[in-house]
Structures are given as C-alpha cells and as structure tokens.
Amino acid sequence: MQNDRKIIHVDMDAFYASVEQHDFPELKGKPLAVGGGMYGVVAAASYEARKFGVRSAMPGRLALEICPDLIVVKPRFHRYKEISQQIRAIFYEFTDLVEPLSLDEAYLDVTENKKDMESANDIAREIRKRIFEETGLTASAGISINKFLAKVASDYNKPNGQKTIHPTQILDFMEDLPIEKFYGIGKVTANKMHELHIFKGSDLKKKSLEELTNLFGKSGNYYYNVVRGIHNSEVKPHRTQKSVGVEETFWENLLDEEAVFKQLEIISEDLETRLSTKEIKGKSLTLKIKYKDFTVYTRSKTQEEYFINAKNFYDTAKKLWELRPFDKPVRLLGLSLSNLNTQEKKQVSVQLKIPFEEFE
C-alpha cells in the first residue's frame, strides 16, 4: 500500500436540493425534490425527503406517492454550475491536483499542498469551512491514502461531517465494512455476494483472487485489492476525456414513448450542463438503451458541425430512438457525446445519477 499519499474526497450534501433550500429559505426543513413531478425522474432529494424514502433516479410519480407533501422544483443547472465553480476555486487554493467527478464532488491530492499544511484532516476541515462561508452549503469529506478509501469515508459521517481512515486502521475498517458500502459494488452485485454469504469485507477477503475472478470477471481483481486497501489510481486533473455522457436507470421500467421522450429531454439538458462546465463540444451523439431483459442497444449519429445544446441532443436522440429494433420496457437511457474538441480542452467527468450496477 502507498501509505504516503494524502487523498481527500469532497462531496456536497444533497447538492441540487440544498442549493434550492439555500436560495429559497421557505423551502428549508421541507421535503423537496429537484426534477421529478408526475412524469419525471427525481434528480436530487433533500434529506427531509429522504426520510420518506425519496431518492435520486426515482420516478416522480412514486416519490409523490410515498411523500404526498413533497415539493417538486425544476432543476436550475446554470445555478448549480455557478456554485460548483466557486467550490472548485476553493479546492485550487490548496492543490492543483483536483479531479472533479461531477458538479458536486471531487478528489484532491494534498500530499504536497499550497498551504504547506501537514494534516490532510485539517485541510478537509478548512475546505468545508470555506465552502460553508462562501456558499452557505455543507460538504462532507473522506480522507485516506487512496481514492477508494477516501470515497468510502466521505459517505461515513454525512451530512456535514468527515472521516479519516488512517493507514493503521485500513485493514480493520475494510473487514468490518458492509459489502454494499464498497464503492463500485451496486445492488445487483451486492445481492449476488449475499447469495455467496459475502456480507462484509472480512467475508470477501476469504475469497482467493482466482475465485473472485471466476465469479465476477475483471471486477474480481478490483474486489480482491480494495478489500486489502489497495487502489493505485492517481488523482488525474489533466486526463483527456474522449467522451462525456449521462445515463438514467429507472426504478420502474418505461413502458411508453411519451415517458421515454420526457426522460430524453431531461437527460439532454443535463448533458448540456456537463459539457458547458468545460465548454466542450462534440460531433458524435450516441443513444444507449438498456431494456428490461438487460439487452443493450446503441445507435450513433456523427455530423460535420458540433452539437451545441440540449435541443440538438434531444432532436437527434428522438431520431435515433425511432431506429431501435425492439419495443420492450426500457430500464435505462443514456446519451453520450464523443469526437470532442479536446485538443485544447482537458477533463470533463461523466456523472451518473446513480452508480453503475457493476464496477467498470
């Protein structure tokens, strides 16, 4: 293990919903969903709404059923981007090694930092303090020797908390960690592991590399290493992104075309926001459809001019949808843009509203 690195994962607390509650004080303390509505999908839920079981990627109809007093507001991506830029400016005061994952979270390597601060724990505390002072929003942080451990730790004391996993604590911490808390292990994989009597890290650790590879393919090597605290991926601030995209997995399968088009419109707007964060454009748009039976269909369109906005994405996505070979219930929709103008541009991250079911 590389015990000499100091990695922080900063994750804003219920970011979209918290921005709305901050900007509109009358929403504070109330169950709130950003996006959703009767025919939409929840993009974010306030902690008050989460107490009722409302969560991101849930159909708005279901959210309103389980929380009748739910307040639904439309996303304001321009505002979320504006605050995200403020937050990133704070990160860069401490280190240039910042790897954004989305508008509301990032990895920071503070092994060597601009403040010459010895303690990564103190740096995380100072960053969270600055974020609150400048935006009125709270953030949580995880601190450890690699990105995986920092990511897991940031979720440990949410909201508005932080946790450090010291090198001497890693093995004990990982052995006690419930398997569904492992970053990269989604619901499907967790259920499979439960069937194999793997419920926490100590159970996973008993499996050999060969067993895990046979059971989980290429992901087996990842599981074998992370349960031992090994994850050597560096914070990559200047990684060139070949594509950028947004996917939505639905709690209830989409059964009609109208519902599909509504989701494609939401996804198109979200994709525009992610691209505009770094002023990135692309010439190839790909529609991804995963059906109820888990079959996947993709179709792309490449044009001479750059796609420039959500309307371009949506209009093209509808045409690509019409070329689909199947009429089956839809489990997932995704749009991604490639053939980017990344000659001069740097990184833009692909954010999923909910994690992959399998680590990739």
Image (spheres, rainbow, N blue to C red):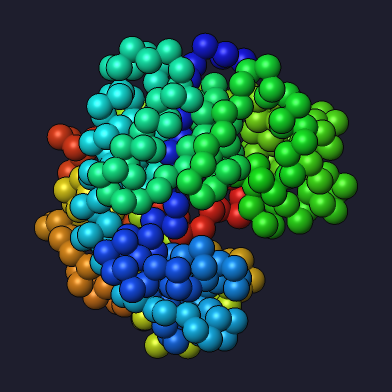
User: Splitting the image into 4 quarters, where does residue 114 fall?
Assistant: top left
Res. 312 in view: yes
Q: Could you say where residue 168 lies in the image, as x and y percent from the top left?
A: 68, 17
| Front-most of residues 121 and 167 | 121
Count of number-bearing discs: 0
Give the vertical position of 70 relative to 250 (above or below): below
Q: Could you say where residue 30 lies in the image, as x and y percent from the top left?
A: 45, 73
| Front-most of residues 132 and 111 | 132
Give the vertical position of 214 relative to 7 (above or below): below
| Front-most of residues 188 and 79 | 79
Q: Residue at x 39, y 68 (%)?
A: 28
Q: Residue furthest right?
A: 197
Q: Residue at x 51, y 63 (%)?
A: 47
Q: Quadrant of the C terminus?
A: top right
Side of 326 relative to 308 (left or right)? right
Q: Residue at x 47, y 80 (%)?
A: 70
